[in-house]
Image: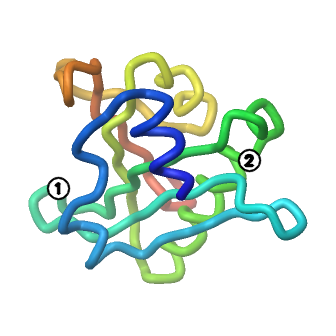
Amino acid sequence: MIRQEVFVEEQGFVVEFDEIDDIAKHIVLFKDETPVGTCRFYWSKEKASHVLGRVAVRKAFRGQCFGQALLQEAEQQVRALQGQSLCLAAQVRAKPFYEKQGYLAAGDEFLDEGCPHIWMYKSLCEDA
C-alpha cells in the first residue's frame, strides 16, 4: 500500500512490484497503528552486498525522521545476518538524505523509468 501510494500514484513509476519482492525481507514502520514507511533488503551475489530498496515514507509523515528509522532498522537486521555492507540505487534528488546516513555515492548516474538514480554504499563494519 505504501509503495503503491508513494512510487506509483505520487511519483509515476510503473514497474514497482517485481520478482525481488519474493526474496526480499520487508520492513514496515508504524506510528501507533498507522503504517507510515517501508523498505526492503536482499542479498545480491552480483553486488556482493545486501541491497536496500523501495525506501518510502508516506507524504503526511515525511520530515519526522521515519526514513532514518527505516534505514537504521534495515542496517540492524543486515548486521544480524552478518552482513557487512548495504548498497542502494538512490533517486538523485534523495542523495543528500542518504549521505547524511553515511552512504557514499559511486559510479555514474543512470535512469530508472526516466528518473535519475545513483548507486550508494555503506559499510556496516564497526571499524570502517
Q: Is residue 23 above or below residue 11?
A: below
Q: Position of residue 37 (x, y in %)?
A: 64, 53
Three-letter code, disc 1:
Lys
Q: Position of residue 49 (x, y in %)?
A: 27, 61
Q: Is residue 112 above or below residue 84?
A: above
Q: Position of residue 88 (x, y in %)?
A: 35, 44
Q: Which numbered disc covers residue 47?
A: 1
Quarter of the view holding residue 114:
top left
Query: Which residue corresponds to the image point at 25% horizontal and 39% vertical from the top-left?
Result: 14
Query: Which residue corresponds to the image point at 37% horizontal and 42% vertical from the top-left?
Result: 121
Q: Residue reaching furthest bottom?
A: 81
- SS class, disc 2: helix
Q: Which numbered disc covers residue 66?
A: 2
Query: Which residue corresponds to the image point at 71% horizontal and 53% vertical from the top-left?
Result: 36
- SS class, disc 1: loop
Give the Cα separation between the discs numbered 2 and 1: 27 Å
